[in-house]
Image (tube, rainbow, N blue to C red):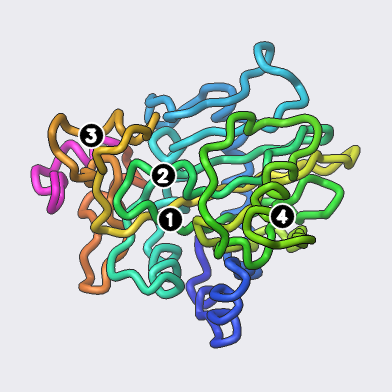
């Protein structure tokens, strides 16, 4: 599915990630995987799930939702095994570890994005604002596009260098019709940046962008008549992350055991470790679903 050689970062790319807060890698997925992943979108949004398990978030349903809303889902890896084989990839996680200089990478969640023609913007935001209930509240994302992205067709956009700004509170109006950059401009002003620049990413289908959790990013409306934009975000955490006593975590806390600050591998698996460890059931899960996790008593992993 993944072309591992695509993840060999050059020194230039590593320093670009450091200075800009994101780095683009072209052609990380082969054509067969692209076709398979694209085919999942109409299926999962219609509620046809390989595992029979619902994703943790499911925004947009035919006949119920606004036709021009951006469609998205959270933790579709629990529902669809094709998506799971990308989201649970050790190669993606190893690349994230290299960028962040982390010893272990744990999955936080995935997000599936579908912007058909006329779909509205997603407000610019910082991913870290969603994770302030964790210690450390750090994340890195690999955003993979399944379509060629175009500036007028709602591609992702970034504000280079904004990962050095303070972390803003959780945005309220994530789906927004009007000025989707307004919150970012206020944050820029507070950070002493007079004219923040935004960069719209135009890349071929199968490309990836890794971005730091603190960078401001989002996407404008899809103004094209015929281009859809589908992508998958893999949001990763440090292996040793813990639940804090601060409030928040509207999805993650569903999976906290009472009184226990650990994030459990059953829900937040370890994708890659410098010492070779990986949550044991992951590869079988991508073939057979939850039967893999439930069959093997050791599958609970190091931390249950
Ligand atoms: O794809 C988009 O429009 C937004 C992506 C995003 O916010 C993310 O992956 O963190």
Residue farthest to the left? 297
Name the image quarter holding residue 65: top right
Disc 3/disc 1 C-alpha distance (Å):
18 Å
Residue farthest to the top? 63
Foreground of the two, 124 or 186 = 186
Of mark 2 and mark 4, the one earlier in the sequence is: 2
- Identified at 82% across, 54% down, the residue is 150
Instruction: Where is residue 232? Give x, y as percent.
Output: 57, 48
Q: Are marks 2 and 1 in contact (CB under 8 Å)?
A: yes
- Identified at 74% across, 60% down, the residue is 201
Q: Are marks 3 and 1 in contact (CB under 8 Å)?
A: no
Of mark 4 and mark 3, the one earlier in the sequence is: 4
Of mark 4 and mark 1, the one earlier in the sequence is: 1
- The residue to which callout 3 is attached is 256
Q: Secondary structure at mark 4?
A: strand
Q: Which mark is residue 302?
A: none
Q: The C terminus is located in which quarter? A: top left
Pointer 3 local density, CA inside 10 Å: few below 14, some 14–19, many at least 20: some
Q: Secondary structure at mark 2?
A: helix
Disc 4/disc 3 C-alpha distance (Å):
33 Å
Q: Secondary structure at mark 1?
A: loop
Q: Is residue 6 above or below residue 254?
A: below
Name the image quarter holding residue 98: bottom left
- Identified at 45% across, 63% down, the residue is 92
Instruction: Where is residue 207? Give x, y as percent.
Output: 64, 63
- The residue to which callout 4 is attached is 157
Foreground of the two, 100 or 233 = 100
Find out if the beta carbon at label 3 lies less than 8 Å from the nearest ligand 1 atom.
Answer: no
- The residue to which callout 2 is attached is 131
């Amino acid at each position: 599915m993944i072309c591992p050689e695509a993840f060999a970062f050059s020194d230039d790319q590593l320093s670009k990630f450091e200075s800009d807060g994101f780095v683009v890698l072209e052609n990380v997925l082969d054509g067969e995987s692209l076709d398979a992943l694209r085919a999942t979108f109409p299926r999962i949004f219609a509620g046809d799930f390989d595992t029979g398990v619902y994703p943790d978030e499911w925004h947009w349903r035919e006949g119920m939702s606004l036709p021009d809303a951006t469609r998205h889902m959270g933790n579709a890896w629990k529902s669809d095994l094709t998506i799971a084989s990308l989201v649970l990839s050790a190669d993606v996680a190893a690349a994230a570890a290299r960028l962040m200089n982390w010893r272990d990478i744990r999955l936080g969640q995935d997000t599936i994005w579908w912007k058909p023609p006329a779909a509205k913007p997603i407000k610019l935001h910082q991913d870290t604002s969603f994770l302030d209930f964790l210690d450390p509240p750090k994340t890195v994302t690999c955003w993979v596009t399944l379509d060629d992205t175009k500036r007028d067709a709602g591609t992702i956009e970034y504000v280079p260098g904004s990962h050095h700004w303070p972390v803003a509170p959780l945005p309220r109006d994530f789906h927004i019709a009007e000025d989707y950059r307004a919150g970012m401009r206020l944050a820029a002003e507070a950070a002493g940046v007079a004219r923040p620049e935004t960069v719209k990413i135009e890349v071929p289908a199968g490309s990836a962008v890794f971005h730091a959790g603190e960078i401001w990013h989002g996407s404008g409306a899809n103004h094209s008549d015929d281009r859809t934009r589908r992508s998958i975000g893999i949001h990763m955490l440090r292996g040793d992350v813990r639940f804090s006593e601060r409030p928040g975590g509207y999805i993650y806390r569903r999976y906290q055991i009472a009184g226990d600050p650990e994030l459990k591998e059953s829900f937040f698996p370890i994708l890659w470790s410098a010492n070779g460890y990986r949550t044991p059931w992951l590869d079988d899960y991508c073939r057979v679903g939850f039967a893999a996790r439930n069959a093997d008593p050791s599958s609970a992993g190091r931390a249950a």
